[in-house]
Amino acid sequence: MPFKLNAARRHHIPKQRHQVTNWAEYDTGLRARGSLTVWFTPEAVEAWKAEPRIGRGGQPSYSALAIATALTLRSVFRLALRQTDRLIASILQLLGLDLPVPDHSTLSRRAETLVVPRPRRGVRPCTCWWTVRG
């Protein structure tokens, strides 16, 4: 009898309130939920490589846009840094783009100076993609 004690407070899946009559559209919609669409505008492809540095120090290979794109995908899919650079490489390969891919150590180092907003659960996403500190 103890399993019936909290029966009223247990979470139960509610019954469907309406009947599906358009199964073809419903099935297509369910399949579309798992699709991932990624596109790069020509401006984004041009901005992928970093501008040359004027001051002292090594030249960066990737722009803030490239690092922010990788870090955004990392936060969306909750990936490790090594998995993130492989995801970016596979996306660029599928798109047929010949762009260099930032490795995990570059992502880690540049993530310290680049802030990528993380959308909170239940809150609309931020309209800005990234901000650069310093």
Image: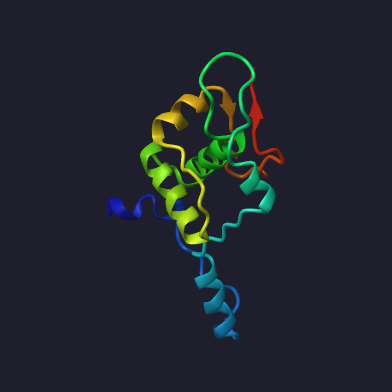
- In this orientation, which residue lies closer to the viewer: 118 or 113? 113
Point out the image quarter for the C terminus.
top right
Measured from the top left, where is residue 93 in percent x and y?
46, 57
Picture quarter containing residue 78?
top left
Residue occupying image coordinates x 42% and y 42%? 85
Question: How far from the left and from the top, in percent, is residue 89?
Answer: 44, 49
Tell which of 6 and 53 is nearer to you. 53
Identified at 47% across, 63% down, the residue is 13
Depicted 39 relative to depicted 51: above or below: below
In the depicted structure, whether residue 41 falls above or below residue 15: above
Seen in the image, is 46 located left or right of residue 37?
right
Q: Residue furthest top?
A: 56
Vertical order, 113 against 64 (above or below): above
- Nearest the viewer among 37 and 90 is 90
Q: Is residue 4 left or right of residue 8?
A: left
Residue at the (61%, 27%) spot, across then down: 52
Image label count: 0
Give the colouring mode of the picture: rainbow
Farthest right residue in view: 127
Residue 19, picture quadrant: bottom right
Residue 119 location (% of width, % of height) = 60, 40
State the residue at coordinates (50%, 72%).
31
At which x and y percent is residue 108? 44, 28
From the image, which quarter does the N terminus lie in?
bottom left
